[in-house]
Amino acid sequence: MMGSEGADLHGAFHNASASGGEMENGQIYNSSFPQRYDIGHVQEVVRQAHEELRQLLQQRSEIMKRIGTVKQTISGLANLFGDAVLNEELMELVDRKTSGRQPGFTKACRMILMESGRAMSSRDICDYFQEKLPALLARHKDPTASVTTVLNRLVEYGEAEAVMANGRRAWKWVADSASNSNQRSDQHVTSSVA
């Protein structure tokens, strides 16, 4: 974690770059910020910041997987018992809120992928749109490219994962694998009872 020295150094770099900082003999100097920093110290601060960033990105990935699992569980329960088991806030959080208008394109792609429970190609998602939400698809000149862009964005957000399925690129909703197997066994028990 960056300490106060790191924060001071960050400020110095910002000021130096804004007003033309110079480097002399392994030290950084700026006339508007009359301090010199040893390049070894700078590299240590950069190393610490890099390590913190790496840890935060790892945490974000784990959190997004957990969010995916919880959303998928809630959505599965709503599919089994009806949307009445969800309050308004929860319906919005899992992208099931029904308004008078159609959902946004990204939101619809997210919902399709999350509820499918399998890897889907951009063509699969376009077919789903064509069947269920044709007006939303009609707004796009190249629907497959638009869907692919959204799916790649969901990968960047940590919500989806790109995989190969039947020799083609596909995407699947990211969720904890242990929770998924628990959910599958819960669904199996529920279907056996029903």
Image (cartoon, rainbow, N blue to C red):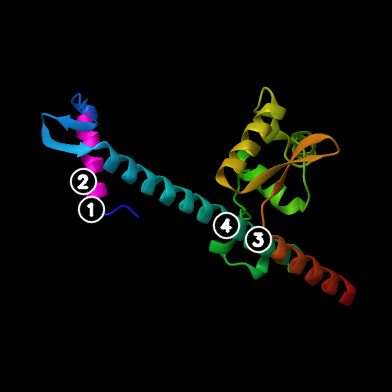
Mark 3, residue position: 69
Which mark's residue is nearer the viewer, 3 or 2? 2
Give the class, few, some or many, for how many residues have Cα within 10 Å of label 1's Cα (few <14, many ≥20): few
Residues at discs 3 and 2 in contact (Cβ within 8 Å): no
Q: Identify the mark nearer the N-term, 3 or 2.
A: 2
Mark 4, residue position: 62
Helix, strand or loop under label 4: helix
Which mark's residue is nearer the viewer, 2 or 4? 2
Helix, strand or loop under label 2: helix
Q: Identify the mark nearer the N-term, 3 or 4.
A: 4
Which mark's residue is nearer the viewer, 3 or 1? 1
Location of residue 181 in the rendering, given as x and y in whole percent from the top left corner: 77, 65
Q: Is residue 30 above or below residue 110?
A: above
Task: Please identify the quadrant where the N terminus is shown.
Answer: bottom left
Helix, strand or loop under label 1: helix
| Residue at image coords 68%, 27% | 145
Residues at discs 3 and 1 in contact (Cβ within 8 Å): no
For residue 32, which quarter of the picture?
top left
Q: Identify the mark nearer the N-term, 2 or 4.
A: 2
Q: CA distance from mark 3 to mark 2?
A: 41 Å
Magenta-drawn segment = 5-16
Question: Furthest-front residue in view?
Answer: 25
Q: CA distance from mark 3 to mark 1?
A: 38 Å
Give the class, few, some or many, for how many residues have Cα within 10 Å of label 3's Cα (few <14, many ≥20): many
For residue 68, which quarter of the picture?
bottom right
Please identify the dominant SS of the magenta region: helix
| Residue at image coords 89%, 74% | 192
Q: Identify the mark nearer the N-term, 3 or 1.
A: 1
Q: Is residue 89 rendered magenta in the image?
A: no
